[in-house]
Every structure is written in C-alpha cells, then in structure tokens.
Image (spheres, grey):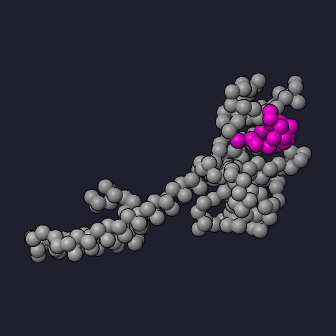
Amino acid sequence: MGDYILFPHLFANDSLRTLVIGIKVVYSKYMKNNRRGFTLLELLISIALLAILVLLMSGNFSTTLKRGRDTKRKADLNQLQKVLETYYEETHAYPVAADVADGTLSIFDKKICSKDLTSPGNPTIVALTIPCPFTTLMIKTPTDPSSIYTYKYVPAADGSSYYLYSYLENDQDTGNTISKTGFNTSTLCSNTGDGTIYCRYYVSSPNATALTAQ
C-alpha cells in the first residue's frame, strides 16, 4: 500500500505492477539470505531491470498524457456546443463567417457575444480584447491543448447547422462520433499544414446529419 501511494503510476499498468513486485521479491530474498555486497554481475542485472522499468513507465506515462489531452478536447467541444445552442436560441442561426470579426471561420481563442439586434450586421465573435455590447456568451473559446493540432468549426452556409471537429491522439478510443481515419468530410485538424492529420472526433448541432468514417 505504501508503494502505491508513493508511486501510483507504477501500479496503473499490469506489466509495471508485475515487474515491480518481482524486483521487490528478488531483492528481499537476496538481502535475507546474503548480507554481503553486490557483485558486478548483480549490479548490471539490477541496472538492466531498472532500465526496463523506466521504458515501461515512459510508455505508460505518454499514453496517460494523450488520454488527458483527448479528455480536454471532448470537454472543450461539448462546452462550446452548449454555447452555440444558446446563440441559436437568441439568433435562430449559428455563427457564419460574416459573424466573425476577422471574416473567417476561426472562432477559437475568441469571445462570443449576444447578437446586437439593433445592428444585426455587427460581428458577434470578436477578439478577446473587444468588449461585448450586450451579453457575453463565452469569455474565451477553447483551443487545442497541443500546438500541433487545432479545432475546426464548419457551419452550413446559411447558419442552419454546424460541425465541431478535433483530433484525438489515443488510437484505442471508440464511439459513434470517433474515427481513426477521419470522416467523409475529410476535414483536417492540423495546425502545421500537415495534409494527413484528419479530424477524428466531432460534435454537431442537433439537426446535422451523422457523419461516417472515410
């Protein structure tokens, strides 16, 4: 129990747990039956075992980080999805390029405002430094936790529906809105211009057609 509290990552994986327990058993028996110092061969074996342990730990730690980033991606898109539904309730349409201050569909790392019905042509998605004339629906839209990937917002031309996309790093993740190879829209989620990084996860407006893996 003490080892688990001090080193929880070692016991999160069956292979790591078995290796650690094996090392402890061998070491305990050795120290019980042999009080002399370690020989060179014994030291080399110990170093080799530690090296294996480090390799196993690094692989497990990397997987944990990927899953953590993927969890954030899903949470970000789900949160933004709720804000977009509030936006739709007020305006009866989802944001399109004309609603974004810079005229693009890049709605991330920006602020979402309620629509000024007295001046409907004013943008509702603005830079973080620009104050909203009325209600602020979202102070700061999320960005991908990795600089390699990016989120994508793809609305219908008339603002009647939309898709929100992200990349997922964990290849073992599954679900109806998850694809290892991307979707039939062939949308890219690369932030580096890589034409092979297809979006692997999406959420959408309730009226959007379900996508299929490509």
* 166 is higher (above) or lower (below) than 178: above
User: Looking at the image, which residue sits at the far right?
Assistant: 158
Work out whether residue 19 or residue 193 is closer to the camera in this orientation and state it: 193
Work out whether residue 193 or residue 208 is closer to the camera in this orientation and state it: 193
In magenta, the rendered stretch is 87-108
On whether residue 51 falls in the magenta region, the answer is no
Tally of numbered discs: 0
Majority SS type along the magenta span: loop
* 33 is higher (above) or lower (below) than 86: below
User: What residue is rendered at 72% in x and 25% in y?
Assistant: 131
Q: Position of residue 21 (x, y in %)?
A: 29, 70
The quarter in which the N terminus is drawn is: bottom left
* 115 is higher (above) or lower (below) than 172: above
The quarter in which the C terminus is drawn is: bottom right
Quarter location, residue 111: top right
Q: Position of residue 153 (x, y in %)?
A: 76, 48
Q: Position of residue 39 (x, y in %)?
A: 17, 73
Residue 89 visible, this orientation: no
